[in-house]
Image (spheres, rainbow, N blue to C red):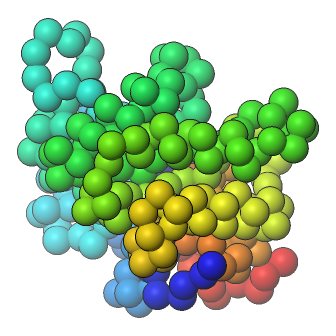
Amino acid sequence: MSETTRTPLMAGNWKMNLNHLEAIAHVQKLAFALTDKDYEAVEVAVLPPFTDLRSVQTLVDGDKLKIRYGAQDISAHDSGAYTGDISGPMLAKLKCTYVAIGHSERRQYHGEDDQVVNVKVKAAFRNGIVPILCVGEGLDVRKAGEQVPFTLAQVDGALAGIPASDAEQIVIAYEPVWAIGTGEVATPEDAQEVCGAIRARLAELYDADLANKVRVLYGGSCKSSNAPGIMAKPDVDGALIGGAALDAEDFVKIVRFRDQAVG
Ligand SMILES: O=C[C@H](O)COP(=O)(O)O
């Protein structure tokens, strides 16, 4: 199942890097390099740490930049005694377009399971923020050849009780854990296998129209050198980029993946 009208999304997940001053400098570099032609072809977003969001918002608003931004996590709760959490209303007030939910580092280091991910997806939609739902298998699962059922179970868990009117807006990032930060990128065929299966599952859970609208991204050691091959696959609609998003030059090259030969 494929559809060519989905606008690719290139989202830079900065993880726990760049303070608020560095964030301003980095977004300025991106803004200087990116052109209207880039924004027409690809949607560009950055996901800075919480402490950078106000600075990024001020810059984007003040200079009317076309770069979108969002957070890397969201509380399941909208307010209250949840020390250290950041709520959906707080992110909405900062005009966040996106929030990453269920990143493997949240699952691994903060014990987030599919049930937690599900309530966070609901919190995002409740506050008008688009979730970038992260799913993907570890090396043991990949070695067992169970990557598709494992990842689809995560999709099922995250989308439980989500109505079609919300689900049609979601972005799903397939990030095989063994490829994250390791330099070991999935092959285009690996990415297509699971991204295609995710889209087919959306068609089962909802319908084919909805499945064709949803953008399914690849993430895991994505760089300008490997992006063109992965993006050429019909069910891959962009990337969630970690390390390479901290290098403005490489990130812009990824945005311009169509200008490069498929390697
Ligand atoms: O969210 C981004 C992913 O974890 C990928 O990170 P990476 O590009 O550094 O492998």
Q: Is residue 6 left or right of residue 244?
A: left
Observer-nearest of 91 and 12: 91
Observer-nearest of 144 and 63: 144
As drawn, 75 above or below 143: above
Counting every numbered tag in the picture gives 0
Question: Which quadrant is the N terminus positioned in?
Answer: bottom right
Residue 150 appears at what percent x and percent y? 69, 40
Residue 10 appears at what percent x and percent y? 49, 65
As drawn, 5 above or below 124: below
Observer-nearest of 205 and 85: 205
What is the quadrant of residue 124 in the picture? top left
Question: Which quadrant is the C terminus positioned in?
Answer: bottom right
As drawn, 19 above or below 68: above
Q: Can residue 80 be seen in this snapshot?
A: yes
As drawn, 170 above or below 93: below
Q: Residue at x 32, y 48 (%)?
A: 162
Q: Residue at x 14, y 29 (%)?
A: 78
Q: Residue at x 87, y 44 (%)?
A: 145
Q: Can residue 249 be seen in this snapshot?
A: no
Observer-nearest of 132 and 18: 132
Q: Residue at x 33, y 43 (%)?
A: 161
Residue 129 appears at what percent x and percent y? 23, 51
Residue 61 appears at what percent x and percent y? 13, 62
What is the quadrant of residue 36 in the picture? bottom left
Q: Which residue is farthest right?
A: 143
Q: Is residue 115 left or right of residue 139?
A: left
